[in-house]
Structure formats: C-alpha cells, structure tokens
Amino acid sequence: MAKIAVLGYGVVGSGTVEVLYKNKANLEKKAGQELEIKYILDLRDFPDSPYKDKFIKDFDTILNDPEVSVVVEVIGGIDPSYNYVKSSLLAGKSVVTSNKELVARKGAELLAIAREKGVNFFFEASVGGGIPIIRPLHQCLSANTIDEIAGILNGTTNFILTKMIRDNMSFDTALKIAQELGYAERNPSADVDGLDTCRKICILTSLAFGKHVYPDNIHTEGITKITPEDVAYCENFGGSIKLIGWAAKQEDDKVAIMVCPAFIHEDSQLAGVNDVFNAILVRGDSTGDVVFYGKGAGKLPTASAVVADIVIAVKMDKSSKSLYWEDSDQDFIEDTENITVANYLRVLDSDKKKIESIFGEVTYLTRKGAPENELAFITEPMSEKQCALNIKTLCDGSASLLGRIRVLEY
Amino acid sequence: MAKIAVLGYGVVGSGTVEVLYKNKANLEKKAGQELEIKYILDLRDFPDSPYKDKFIKDFDTILNDPEVSVVVEVIGGIDPSYNYVKSSLLAGKSVVTSNKELVARKGAELLAIAREKGVNFFFEASVGGGIPIIRPLHQCLSANTIDEIAGILNGTTNFILTKMIRDNMSFDTALKIAQELGYAERNPSADVDGLDTCRKICILTSLAFGKHVYPDNIHTEGITKITPEDVAYCENFGGSIKLIGWAAKQEDDKVAIMVCPAFIHEDSQLAGVNDVFNAILVRGDSTGDVVFYGKGAGKLPTASAVVADIVIAVKMDKSSKSLYWEDSDQDFIEDTENITVANYLRVLDSDKKKIESIFGEVTYLTRKGAPENELAFITEPMSEKQCALNIKTLCDGSASLLGRIRVLEY
C-alpha cells in the first residue's frame, strides 16, 4: 500500500482528494497497489469533511513518517512550498506538484535532488492543467529535435481576449467580467501581465532543451495595452490576438524565448482556441506540428493531472529514470534585442512615405471608423533592436505610436 | 547496449532507421544505453544503402539471436507480421509496431503474451502517426473515466473531404488528386471505406475501456457517397463533414462505437482539422475535452513515434507494467440499432408535412440552386433502428432518399 500526503486543501488539493477517491479501484489497478491518503496538511479546520481525521497542521509529522512515500504539494508559491518539497525529496519521498512558480524557479535544483535520491519529482499539472503535455513532450516526442514551442498557456487572459474579440469589449470591461466569473483574481497581475504564461513557457523550454530557463531572464508582455482598435485591425489581418509564450531554436543554436500578445493567422491551430481553453503547439523536426488542447485550469482537470502523476510515481516507486534538466547560466538564451519577428504597428500623424522609407515594404491594414490621421501596418520580420530604432525614428517628429503587437507564424 | 531488429524497410522502416541514427546521441542519453540496429529484415536488396551490411532475409536469424532485445515490426498486414511478432514476444523480446491492423485484430492476444513474458508490446505509431495519443491516453489521463473518444483518424479521407469542401469538388475528382499526390493508394478502399479509421478507433476504445474491440463488429461507413450537395447543406448547417471514428459510453454502461461521415459544428475543435492532419478528442469525466492534433501519417512523423517507443522499451527493459487490455466477447458493445444520433437527411419528392408527421420536429437546411422537389433537414436524435424505420415510411410512396449523414456533437 502506498501512503500519500497532500499539502494544501485549496481548489487543487480538495480536487485531488476527490478524484483519487472517486476512481480509487481503477487507479489502484493501474498503480499495482492500494492507494491511501494518510495526511492532508492545511492550517484551516475542516470539521465537516469526510476526511477530517486526516488533517494535520504540522509538516514534520509527514516528513518524519517513513510510511509516506509520495508527497503532493498543491499549496502554490515558493514559501513554504519550496522547503516542504526539498525536504521531502531529501527524505527519499517522491513529490508531485502543480506549482508552476516552484518548478520554474527551482526545478533544476529539485530535479537534481530527486535524481540523487532516486525518487520522482513530477509536475504534469504545472502546465496546461488537465492537458497531458509534460510527459508527452518528454517521452513521446523524444525521437524529435524540438525546434519550437508556442502556447496559449493562461486561460484567464485567453478568456479576456476572446471577450474583447467576440463582443468588441475594452480590456477593462472584459477583465471585470472575468473577475465576476471567478476566472480572474482581484489582483489579476500575474495573469494579465504575462507572468503566469512566462513560468509555463520556461518549464516547457527547460524540458525541451534540457537546460533550466529562469523566468527573470525572459521578455514578458501582458495584454493590458491591447485596445478594441487593435482587435479590429487584427480582424482585417485575418486572425486573432492571443497571448503566446513561445520558444524557438535559432540558427546560432541559442533559443529565443518571449511572452507577448501576438497576431495569429486564422489558419493556425492556435487561432481557434477560445475562452479559458489552452493549447500548446510543439514543432519537432520529424513529427512536424503537434498540438495539445484542453482546459488549462480548473479544479478537476488540474486534479486529474496530479492524480495521474501520483499513480505513475507509485508504480515507478524508486526508479526515477525520466524527466530531467540541468541547471544553466542562461548563456543559451538569445538576447531579446536579437529576436526577429514581424510587427503590427499603429501610428498617429505619420504618412505612408515616411513609414516606407523607415520600415521598407509594409502591408497596410484598415478598420471601420479609423480617423484619417491613423495608420496601421505589418512589417517584415526584423530584430527587436531594429524595430525599436525604427519606431524611434518614425516618432521623432509629430508622429506617435499607438500600439505594437508582434506577428507570429504558428 | 541494446540491439534492435527492424522488420521491413518500406516507408516507415527506412524512416525509423533514419530517425534513430540522426538523433542517436540524444536518444541514447534518454534510453540510458547505446542503441544499435543489428538487423534489417527485407526480401529486397539495398546494395547502395549505408546500412547494407545489416540486411538479412531470414527472420529466424533474428529470433534465434539472444542479443536482439527489441524487434520493430513495420511491415504491416497480418501475414507474416503476426507470426513474427508473436514468436518474438514468446522468445522474450520486446516488440514495437506501427501496424494498426495487427493491433486491432490481435492486440489482446499479443498483450497477454507480452505480460506473461514480462516484455513490452508498444504501438504508439499505430494511431495518429506522430501524434502522441496511445501513451497519453493510457498514462496521463489515467485519473479519468473516459466517457467518449472521437477522432479524425485517416489523413487520406480528410484530405479528400477538405478538397470537396474548399474547392467544391466531387468525391471522384478529389480522390484522383489524392492519388496523384501519393496520399491515396491505387486501390483506396481501406481508406475511403472507413476500414483504416475503424481499426484505429478499435485500438483507442480497447485501451480506454480495457477490453478488446474487434473491427468486424463495428458499423463502418466511408465517404464515397458524399456529394457536393451534402457539402453545401453542411455549410448552411454551419459546419464541416468529417469522417469520424467515435466511441461513447452509454447509460447502460455499454459502449457505442461507429465509423461514419458526420456533420461537425464549426465551433468544434475537430472542424478546423484539414488536409492530411488528424485529431483525436478525448472526453474525460475530470479533465473535460482534451484534443491531440498533428500529422497522422508520413514517413518521419510515424517513424518518430516508433523510435520513441523503442527508447521507452529499452529504458524499461523487462519491466512491462503498462498498456494492457483483456480479450472480450464483445458483449459490452452497444447494438448498432440502439445507437442514438441526430441525422441530416436529403430527400426528393417529399413534402414538409409528411416529413414532420414522421420525424417530428426537424430543422430545414437550404442550398443555392437546389431543385424545388429537394428537401434537406436535421432530425432530433433517434436510434438507428427508428431512423431506418422512419426513412422507410417516408420513402414508401414517391419520395426517395438522396443522402443521409449523421450529426455528431464534439
């Protein structure tokens, strides 16, 4: 019998307990042994819970119980999760977590401890909620050299963008609705400023390229500056605006990584991903484009990913052979200013002649009701540095920049 | 060092050798040991191949070589593949195959032998080519009860349907183009009559529900009867016609399985899957809808799935703990006549009053240039038996049925 401890009884924690007991017989068949949740750690009391006898408040009880072989960390954040996870691994217990911040910041260190101790450190639920992506990326696509990864990795921002596109709403109005529906936090910064997406693309990139990518190094833009005017121009372009976390191998073998809103052509498999859904596109040298789609968050989807990890951790017991990346000094990450993409630009008080003299060939877009002194256009691909220089030159006189969104081809 | 034998040097076989040697260093890191292809079995000669020293013509050399631990069967068909695979497993060798016919017909027997001998029998490449689906379905979604699976599982038919829809072509013209491009065989029956899709949905259903589903028992319709008129009505319906292999758990705990062309609403994640691409939707009780998308065929995508299986087979060595289903007397499969779906029907020389008196409430569709004596409509969901009876009643007099396509909600 495998004894499990669950750290945190919030949305994902309670979902994990629910899914595990609901499918217990089937899961035990797959795990090859009985599964029992011995402890649930939470500072709150749950006197009415059917599991009330399992609740404890002191982590050391779990750490010092040799019967507990799998620790499930679903508290989130770094403190106290990091210490709990690290000491569990050091004590020879496998850990399953849904905590993307922890994996994005401390993954390399924790994976190294897990390897040294011969236990498992799994985190399928940290990216894409219930979508299987971590293990397929590692295992099934192992015969590929991964060239690119691009994902809609945050359901909250995708919901807001979908509202802005479908219902012609402003960002503020769409955010308010997302908050009312419980999709966005009262302080929505981690979502709308792109931080959550950044952590997730860092995890995927670390796994795909074998070296840890730290979120602090990645150019990250959110969706707060997107306007209904941009949405209208994107419709004329023939696509949708999506918040994309992406990583692409460069010719110099460095990896370009960025989080930014982007014009995505309607033919792309990412363009039709709406509302709170997520999708991750993986471009392999042999397999071509593979896309994984589903609910990126929510109690039961995320919990089902946690529980699947628990089953594999129990089945594999102490034979930790998979999932690993090295720590890194980030020298394989391309400087942001060298990253080359096409751009959508919206400017006031300029003229086509000046635009073309600076940017070369561009494609103009139109929208209904645009003022006469507004121009919007798509540039050819150019480096971030060059684009910034060109914008500066363009806005040297009376012209001003109203909006800039990158154009990505996925 | 793991020594591997590849049976068959056709498209997938040569791709497998190519992918394995191209990514050798990386694969060996993942497998934890060196990988060497010791034999390639083919009746033909390849005097110019860089691997010419590896070719043999006698399978017994492989069978009797204790050094060979993994046999890769990429010949296809039942004879001689079945004997080769069975005797390899009985000799204690793991087997990796891309052969959907073999798995669909003999999977339960071969899985039982693999389990008894403690070796692996893997077949990721048999469904969805380079799309990871077998292992994610088994592993990552293990915490779910699977309620439904629906897939666009055959690239040839999807290419033909895409041509018919986008370019307003007849089936025959689109098939001819598919043949010219090498997407369809000279004898295209296995594709266009739905047989290939049937084998694949049988494999997925066997895995999801744990009992072998034999293709012979499944109602299978192809796409040969679809006309440009049906395509036009489907556009008015607001969707696309796709060939779908699907399985759905019923209230009586039986499983309804069918292969049929279907109207799919444009909001579905399956509607935007075009050309030779495949997609598989899995509906789990916890995770909701998850969709896997990518190239369902082709040399390198399929080979990359084969090679990934080889790596896992080598890494897991003799610890076959996963992937299993039981043989079955098919009593869990719903009788076709009890399967309940909505239908699109196109009839000549009938009238709305008669249609509604027989079918109850229906939704009429329109198309440009329809003759006055043609009517097309969508019924409410009804059993196959009831639908057949209603059609018979409707066509009792002068009216005749021009087309019937099921309407599925995915």
Image (spheres, coloured by chain):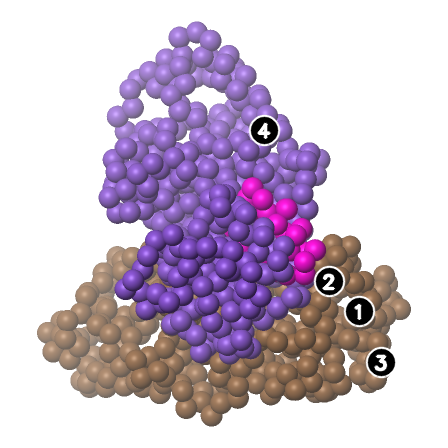
Chain colours: A brown, B purple
**Amino acid under label 4?**
Thr
What residue sits right under mark 2 in the picture? A31
Labels 3 and 1 touching (C-beta < 8 A): no
Residue A399 found in image quarter:
bottom left
**Amino acid under label 2?**
Ala
Extreme residue in the bottom direction? A329
**Residue A86: where, in percent of width, then height?**
69, 86
CA separation in Å, label 2 and label 4? 35 Å
Q: Secondary structure at mark 1?
A: strand
From which residue to which does the magenta span run?
B103-126
Labels 4 and 3 touching (C-beta < 8 A): no
Nearest to N terminus: mark 3 or mark 1: 1
State which mark lies toward you, 2 or 3. 2
Q: On residue A65, which mark appears?
A: 3
Residue A160 visible in the snapshot: no
The reply to whether label 2 and label 4 mark residues of one chain is: no
**Chain of the residue under label 3:** A
User: Residue at 24% of width from left, 78% of height from top?
Assistant: A382
The reply to whether label 4 and label 3 mark residues of one chain is: no
Residue A226 found in image quarter:
bottom left
The reply to whether label 3 and label 1 mark residues of one chain is: yes
